[in-house]
Image (spheres, rainbow, N blue to C red):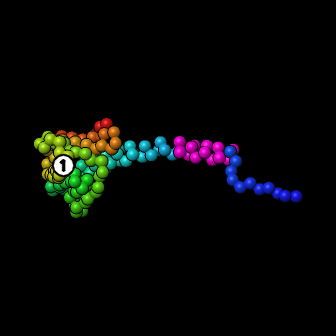
Amino acid sequence: MKVISYKGVTLIELVAVLFIVSLVVAIIFPSFEIFGENKLKSEALEIGSILKYLNESASSSKETFSIVFDFNEQTLIWNEKEGQRKKKFEDISGVETQSNGLVNRGELILFFPPTGIQQNIIVHLNRDDKKLMVALNHLNGKIKIYD
């Protein structure tokens, strides 16, 4: 008696594998879009906390601190009590102040004197089609994030 063995997959096995793969893709793919939005919001929150920290630290320690927005390198460089810090932010598209208007090329240096910042600062962030603005109010030192 001869035993015939077939090597390969049946149509039902192929359909089952395709169903499982499509189900996994449907579950995972939307979470990648949310990841981009969350990254933009976390950058906005971090920039807001840096601005507020510099403003409050300058007032409490009676020292002048500075922050440099480097649009070519997409970095923030700021001086604080512990020294100089540097961080890369990929989504900063511009910074708006009352004295400089909207700056989105080169470098912008802002100083936080002991009396506190003397003008409002608005940092513009863009990722794909999502835009956020981080605003520091110079009168009360509060940060607000706008869509």
Q: Which residue, given by chain and number where applicable, does mark 1 sit on?
A: 105
* Front position in the image: 139 or 104: 104
Q: Residue furthest right?
A: 1
Q: Is residue 102 left or right of residue 133?
A: left
Q: Residue furthest bottom?
A: 83
Q: Main secondary structure of the magenta part?
A: helix
Can residue 126 be seen? yes
Which residues are the magenta region?
12-27
Residue 140 within the magenta-colored segment of the rendering? no
Q: Amino acid at mark 1?
A: Arg
**At which x and y percent is residue 115?**
14, 48
Report crowding for label 1: few under 14, some 14 to 19, many 20 or more residues within 10 A (C-alpha).
few
Can residue 145 be seen? no
Q: Which residue is depicted at the point 34% across and 42% down? A: 128
The N terminus: image quadrant: bottom right
**At which x and y percent is residue 118?**
14, 44
Please state the total of marks drawn on the protein image. 1
Q: Which residue is depicted at the point 77% across and 56% down? A: 5
Q: Residue furthest front?
A: 2
Q: Which residue is depicted at the point 22% across and 56% down? A: 78
Q: Is residue 34 left or right of residue 81?
A: right
**At which x and y percent is residue 29?**
49, 44
Q: Quadrant of the rendered structure where residue 95 is?
A: top left
Q: Quadrant of the rendered structure where residue 98 is?
A: top left
Q: Which residue is depicted at the point 37% across and 47% down? A: 39
Q: Is residue 22 left or right of residue 32?
A: right
In this rendering, is residue 7 above or below 121? below
* Front position in the image: 101 or 104: 104
